[in-house]
Amino acid sequence: MTPQGNLPARSGAEQRPRDSRFGEQPSSLLRHWVIPFGVLSGLSVVLFFVFRLWDWGEFGGEKSLLEALFLLDADQAADAIGGIKDVLNAIVPLVVTVVAIVVQLAAQRYTPKLVDLFIADRATIAYFALMVVATMYALLMVYARFDDLLPFWGTLVMLLLTGAVVGLLIPYINYVFLFLTPENIIRIIRRNAKTSMARMQQAKGRPGETRRYQRDVANAMEQISDIALSAVSQMDRNVALLSIRSLKDVMADHLLIKRRMPAVWYRPNKDYFPAASTDFLNEIHRTRTWVEAKGFMDMELIFKMSIKEMPDAVSAVANSTKIIGQYAIRLRDTLVLQAVIEFFNTFLRHALNDRNPKALYNLFYQYRLLAEEVLLVDQKLAERIAFYFKYYGQLAQTYNVPLILITACFDLSYLLKKGYQVQAPNLDALMTTFLEVDDNPATQSNEFDLRSVRKAQLAFAAFLLSQGDERLVQRIANDMKQEPRERMETIQREMLSVSDRKFWEVTDRGVNFFFLEDAEKEHLKDFYRRYIEPNYPPRDAKLQVAAPGR
């Protein structure tokens, strides 16, 4: 397995140390629980003793200090116990009502399964258990007979239990609100999935435990997806992006340990793929990719819902898909990498059906970054990706989606530059696909798109000339032999006139496709002089004089 240090950078959630008791780290436990409880309880005790001693000094009379501070009479103790019981009777319903309302509102906003998470939370269980014990103890104390028996220690314990309930009230309410933040909810869901996967490694393939841990992981991904879908519908951008990243993190967690999983783990449960055919289930069983397939299918739902409402979520899905592909490359998991490519193509299809140029633009960018890494490990697969760029680019033009063919062509040129730099053995095959981008009736009939494709090819020719590669330059020149002189001269003028690297509108990539450095412009002129101009008959003297005035 590839060392961890060579894997893609992990998110902040992945770098946190293991959680301690009550789902809190030690520093957080101290800050959110111990210090507030100590301050509130300590302040109350100090105020009690200060003013009690003051009153004793002023009005104590014949009473001793012990009598002034504590109850030493059975009747008074019984009255105090009744008062403490009333305090508990007021606090417990208040806490239950507030928590129930807040949790219900959060569940409606994020995911109904939040209730399950909250009920299973150890801090909540501990605090409610404390309230139940204190209340039951108070009831028993109320109905106990004292007569001449002084319930000193019983009353003291009751006072301490009630003090703990009251003193922890504000920290617990604060904890509830922190618990219900989307960041914390998603963190807990992801932690539960990671824990289930870790326990599966120790279960040794026992059927009952396998089904339980599979259910935990599948439910975790569904919960995160539900939060993302809800966030998209409510235009909550930050929560949507966080959910998509966390869904990616769950898939990455599985990739890192899947080789240590027992074979029974990879047998998918049809309940998690209700619309899938038997052939599909058999396929993901054979390829051992049910977790990745589940994650990508959830991402597909998010993608389709986000494509009109939230472009940033579309970009996040594309970026997350690329990162999973990078994990697969470094872990040499070719079957997951194949799934990544299939879902990239699926996302492109959805964006084409929606006629969404921005989504296509971002998808091609992330796809190309992945293709550059694929080129280093699997040249045949990189060739297939290059074909997909050409195919979906031409399809976008057929669908009348503007500028996408141009984007695909320039991304192919960047991929070719990468291949040339790493001396990829299949560079000729990639070049063939690159030169076939404009072999499409729709492109030939669209002058702007045709000129733009030629610009990408000419820019790559200028790059090749800068590297001294005459053979590949000649291939580009041969492909342009039949182009009309007027078109080629127009293309040259337009390319030489671009002086700003950055496009004059805001774009995600931040660069102008048609920009060339000064040195590249000189190589472009050289290409025209040596390979383009000889294709046309020389101009007569009259045309040469008239040319500057055109």
Image: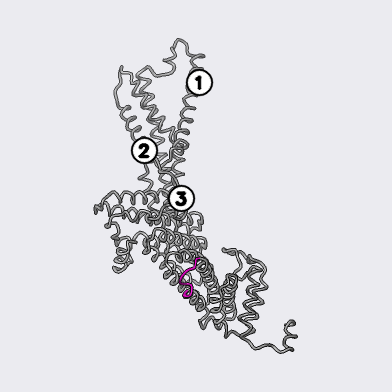
Measured from the top left, where is residue 57 in percent x and y? 50, 14
Question: What span is in magenta?
Answer: 422-429
Label 3 amino acid?
A: Pro
Classified by dominant secondary structure, the portion drawn in magenta counts as: loop
- Badge 2 local density, few (<14 within 10 Å), some, or many (20+)? few
**Which corner quadrant holds the N terminus?**
bottom left
Label 2 amino acid?
A: Ala
Judged from the image, the secondary structure of the residue bearing numbered disc 1 is helix
> Could you tell me which residue is drawn at 67 percent across and 88 percent down?
538
Mark with earlier residue (2, 3):
2
Q: Nearer the viewer, residue 504 or 44?
A: 504
Pointer 1 residue: 50
Whether 425 is among the magenta residues is yes
User: Can you say whether 435 is above or below 362 in the image?
Assistant: below
Residue 349 seen anywhere in this rendered image of the structure: no
Whether 282 is among the magenta residues is no
Measured from the top left, where is residue 96 in percent x and y? 39, 41
Mark with earlier residue (1, 3):
1
Label ID, residue 126:
2
Query: How far apart in space, not on screen, are marks 1 and 3 (Cα)?
Result: 44 Å
**Which corner quadrant holds the C terminus?**
bottom right
Dividing the picture into quarters, in which one does residue 525 lie? bottom right
Query: How far apart in space, not on screen, are marks 1 and 2 (Cα)?
Result: 32 Å
Mark with earlier residue (1, 2):
1
User: Can you say whether 391 is above or below 377 in the image?
Assistant: below
Q: Nearer the viewer, residue 504 or 454?
A: 454
Judged from the image, the secondary structure of the residue bearing numbered disc 3 is helix
Q: Nearer the viewer, residue 544 or 343?
A: 544
Pointer 3 residue: 182
Label 1 amino acid?
A: Val
